[in-house]
């Protein structure tokens, strides 16, 4: 049976807090920039005991399975927006899958609702920070960010669609990027629409009360968020199953082809041949046989359902040092027209983060006659450069449009410098196309000559 203990500023509770902080908390939040110090936590509990929070509140609740510390939740109640903030939700690896997280969330939502009711208000909703599952690698987290996102989805939370960034928690720490603010509506005030002004107030009060930033307006992170939110009435919701490419209503089964002996190798090439007739931009079967043996090359067989005997789509891509190059993508029925391209992009970015946790993004070459709109809709930007793909057989190089996208949700132009583009392009020409002197290739020299100020122009 799960029991709960809310800590106070009393001496015995502070002793329990020290044990929790030194074991479960530090082990599950290894990034020091994301952690609160023990001294700060103890200080907040003492301030709470002295009435410092007023109509606001601060909670540290531990969950026990018998005598075992099973998990914890640290949360704030913000009176002015009548909203709760989950600072940290922790479940011991020893008890995961046994309902501890759900029990903690049900408990803290009831506690926060009681805070609101004590002030004569209804709890509008609860928000929490979460690592972006398409911008943070599982290798840099204590739990796979995709698995975490799907857990929050089951709890009723969705991403709030604005560029969230956590300011530094102290002078010795750095701002935290790669985050999404997620939220769950608990009243009519947020259920039909989430007002942007309310989220601005939540962020402001959270920084003021929980992060001890006396003037959030002085924080560049807050100013950027507030400016974005002030330009709109409502904040869009990002369903977390859809954002991670795991939407139950539109599943996408991805099978990584392991080699020429994989039964899906021939099936995937059949999909490829139907979509890409022979020509200067099409690679032959021998090219796939050679590439699939490389550790940083990926060939995927795609199905709308895992039970389908034949794949109805394919994708291929190369993971390079700091970026990736998307090779070929083809959807046949029933995938074609099904709206699953965003799911493919989500799965692609998760794979790239597994390959290179610090990856900057990925490129796509869009050949003549290919519609670039699907790429624009998922956040790609077209580079205003004269790029030509090296011919894969006899003939001249082929003019292509070159697109780029950083991983994760995109809210503005990509930060792509000229030197980075030229380094990436040299590696593409060398690794993917086998160009012996890539910086002497006409495409590389032509693009280098146009980047006079070192900035990559966009269309």
Image (spheres, grey):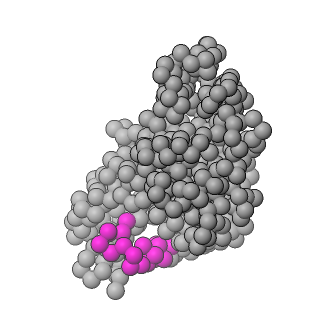
**Residue 15: where, in percent of width, then height?**
21, 66
Of 265 and 139, the residue lying toward us: 265
Q: Residue at x 48, y 59 (%)?
A: 262
**Residue 136: where, in percent of width, then height?**
46, 49
Quadrant holding the C terminus: top right
* Image-based side of 201 in relation to 32, left or right: right
* Image-based side of 230 in relation to 19, left or right: right
**Residue 378: where, in percent of width, then height?**
66, 47
Q: Residue at x 39, y 60 (%)?
A: 143
Of 341 and 396, the residue lying toward us: 396
> How many numbered circles does the render carry?
0
Span of residues in magenta: 90-109
Considering the whole magenta stretch, tell me its main secondary structure.
helix
Q: Considering only vertical position in the picture, is 210 above or below 113?
A: above
Q: Considering only vertical position in the picture, is 437 above or below 285?
A: above
Q: Residue at x 57, y 64 (%)?
A: 253
Of 377 and 175, the residue lying toward us: 377
Q: Is residue 397 magenta?
A: no
Q: Residue at x 60, y 70 (%)?
A: 309
Quadrant holding the N terminus: bottom left
Q: Considering only vertical position in the picture, is 439 above or below 14?
A: above
């Amino acid at each position: 049976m799960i029991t709960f203990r809310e800590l106070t500023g009393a001496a015995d509770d502070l002793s329990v807090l020290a044990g929790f902080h030194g074991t479960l908390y530090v082990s599950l939040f290894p990034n020091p920039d994301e952690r609160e110090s023990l001294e700060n936590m103890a200080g907040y509990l003492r301030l709470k005991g002295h009435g410092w929070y007023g109509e606001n509140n601060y909670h540290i609740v531990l969950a026990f399975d018998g005598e075992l510390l099973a998990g914890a939740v640290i949360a704030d109640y913000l009176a002015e927006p009548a909203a709760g903030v989950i600072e940290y939700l922790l479940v011991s690896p020893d008890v995961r899958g046994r309902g501890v997280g759900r029990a903690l969330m049900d408990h803290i939502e009831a506690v926060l609702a009681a805070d609101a009711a004590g002030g004569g208000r209804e709890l509008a909703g609860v928000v929490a920070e979460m690592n972006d599952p398409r911008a943070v690698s599982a290798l840099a987290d204590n739990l796979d960010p995709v698995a975490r996102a799907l857990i929050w989805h089951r709890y009723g939370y969705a991403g709030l669609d604005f560029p969230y960034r956590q300011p530094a928690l102290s002078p010795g720490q750095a701002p935290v990027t790669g985050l999404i603010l997620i939220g769950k509506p608990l009243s009519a005030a947020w259920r039909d629409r989430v007002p942007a002004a309310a989220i601005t107030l939540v962020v402001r009060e959270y920084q003021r009360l929980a992060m001890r930033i006396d003037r959030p307006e002085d924080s560049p992170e807050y100013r950027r968020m507030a400016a974005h939110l002030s330009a709109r009435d409502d904040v869009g919701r990002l369903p977390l199953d859809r954002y991670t490419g795991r939407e139950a209503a539109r599943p996408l089964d991805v099978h990584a082809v392991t080699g020429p002996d994989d039964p899906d190798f021939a099936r995937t090439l059949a999909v490829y041949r139907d979509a890409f007739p022979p020509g200067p931009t099409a690679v032959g079967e021998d090219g796939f046989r050679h590439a699939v043996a490389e550790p940083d090359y990926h060939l995927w067989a795609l199905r709308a359902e895992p039970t389908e005997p034949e794949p109805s789509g394919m994708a291929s891509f190369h993971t390079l040092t700091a970026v990736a190059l998307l090779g070929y993508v083809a959807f046949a029925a029933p995938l074609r027209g099904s709206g699953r391209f965003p799911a493919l992009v989500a799965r692609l970015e998760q794979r790239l983060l597994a390959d290179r946790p610090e990856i900057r993004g990925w490129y796509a070459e869009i050949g003549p006659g290919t519609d670039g709109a699907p790429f624009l809709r998922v956040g790609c930007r077209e580079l205003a450069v004269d790029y030509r793909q090296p011919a894969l057989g006899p003939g001249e190089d082929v003019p292509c449009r070159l697109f780029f996208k950083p991983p994760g949700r995109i809210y503005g132009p990509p930060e792509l410098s000229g030197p980075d583009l030229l380094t990436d392009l040299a590696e593409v020409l060398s690794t993917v196309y086998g160009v012996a002197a890539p910086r002497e290739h006409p495409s590389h020299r032509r693009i280098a000559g146009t980047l006079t100020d070192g900035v990559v122009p966009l269309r």
